Image (tube, rainbow, N blue to C red):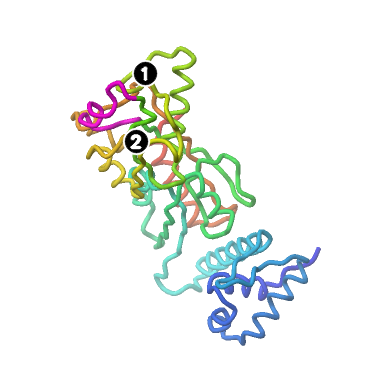
């Protein structure tokens, strides 16, 4: 089996992180020619093109694999140095995690607060939709992720966390104005961004329930027909979890809101549930590198414990 020289692997990672060969050379205190030669030698050794020579450079699919290995190697080296007492005094261990906005706004930060303060950890969170957080893990950009995918990324372990429950909700004034005799699928709605499919998924399921003879429930739920998709109803994009809830409560549109966030507003009458008894549950999983990393294990335990208390369990 062909070895992967560590100096070449680290050089490839530096080029990806810095964006150019010149910047990587400055960071590594090498000449740009030496950096280029190391990357070319690694490509010859693996028999694959690892970098697209764009500005900034981008790793190929094969390059992503080597970059992920390089980041894992750096984590193992850091942990080993810490165990040997070779790290700087009090130097925090950096833990990178991809997490979806609704988890970040509800249960995830309390999970991090449960992590012991010694040894010190520095969290770097990347906010991304739960359907795409695994991509950041696959590219080696994060060490762990809260994701909706139960299929483990190569080199990662996966454990179920629970289900985040969403309910279709709107302000009472909005329901009275837009959902009296009007199909829910044609009423203005709030989405997180253009890739947010939660509202459309709920409409498709509601339409299927009604078509199969399910009982109608709530304003507009008895007639969910109407355009579903970008060409349908007016869509307001609000790319923060808190802003999304505020937009629904302000009457800009209806939307799927996390039960944990909307509970007080529903109880106080500030929101009405549009389809009582028909929530939408999104399963969440914790995926992380398969590394014997004390820091990562500590975070994983805190996340799992908090999720068991905060999310709906099977």
- Give the residues drawn in magenta, as a range: 168-182
Residue 230 x %, y % = 44, 40
Asked which secondary structure carries label 2, the reply is strand
Residue 119 x %, y % = 41, 62
Quarter where residue 38 is shown:
bottom right
Front disc: 1 or 2: 1
Residue 158 x %, y % = 56, 43
Which residue is at the far front?
Answer: 231
Residue 44: numbered disc: none
Q: Is residue 278 above or below residue 71?
A: above
Seen from the viewer's position, the closer of residues 215 and 106 is 215
Disc 1 target residue: 222
Q: Residue drawn 57% across and 85% down?
A: 29
Residue 176 magenta-highlighted: yes
Quarter of the image where the N terminus is located: bottom right
Sequence order check, earlier mark of 1 and 2: 1
Quarter where residue 187 is shown:
top left
Q: Is residue 197 left or right of residue 173?
A: right
Seen from the viewer's position, the closer of residues 258 and 292 is 258
Seen from the viewer's position, the closer of residues 124 and 131 is 131
Badge 2, how many Cα within 10 Å: few under 14, some, many 20+?
Answer: many
Q: Residue drawn 41% across and 59% down?
A: 123
Residue 280 magenta-highlighted: no
Which residue is at the far left?
Answer: 268
Which residue is at the far bottom?
Answer: 31
Asked which secondary structure carries label 1, the reply is loop
Q: Is residue 245 above or below residue 118?
A: above
Compute the Cα span from label 1 to label 2: 17 Å
Q: Residue drawn 79% across and 66% down?
A: 2
Disc 2 target residue: 255
């Amino acid at each position: 089996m062909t070895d992967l020289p560590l100096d070449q692997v680290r050089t490839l990672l530096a080029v990806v992180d810095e964006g150019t060969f010149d910047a990587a050379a400055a960071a590594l205190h090498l000449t740009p020619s030496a950096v280029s030669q190391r990357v070319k030698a690694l490509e010859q050794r693996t028999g694959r093109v690892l970098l697209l020579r764009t500005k900034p450079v981008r790793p190929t699919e094969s390059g992503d694999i080597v970059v992920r290995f390089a980041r894992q190697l750096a984590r193992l080296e850091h942990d080993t140095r810490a165990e040997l007492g070779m790290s700087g005094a009090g130097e925090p261990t950096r833990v990178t995690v991809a997490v979806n906005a609704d988890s970040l706004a509800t249960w995830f930060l309390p999970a991090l607060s449960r992590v012991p303060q010694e040894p010190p950890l520095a969290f770097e969170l990347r906010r991304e939709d739960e359907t795409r957080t695994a991509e950041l893990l696959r590219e080696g950009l994060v060490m762990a992720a809260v994701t909706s995918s139960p299929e483990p990324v190569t080199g990662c372990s996966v454990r179920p966390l629970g289900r985040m429950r969403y309910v279709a909700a709107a302000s009472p004034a909005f329901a009275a104005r837009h959902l009296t005799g009007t199909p829910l699928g044609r009423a203005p709605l709030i989405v997180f961004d253009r890739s947010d499919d939660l509202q459309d998924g709920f409409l498709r399921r509601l339409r299927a329930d009604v078509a199969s003879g399910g009982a109608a429930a709530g304003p507009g739920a008895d007639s969910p027909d109407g355009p579903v998709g970008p060409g349908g109803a007016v869509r307001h994009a609000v790319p923060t979890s808190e802003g999304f809830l505020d937009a629904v409560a302000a009457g800009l549109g209806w939307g799927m809101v996390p039960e944990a966030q909307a509970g007080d507003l529903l109880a106080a009458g500030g929101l009405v549930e549009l389809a009582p008894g028909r929530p939408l549950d999104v399963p969440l999983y914790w995926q992380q590198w398969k590394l014997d990393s004390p820091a990562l294990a500590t975070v994983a335990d805190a996340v799992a414990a908090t999720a068991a208390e905060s999310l709906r369990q099977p």
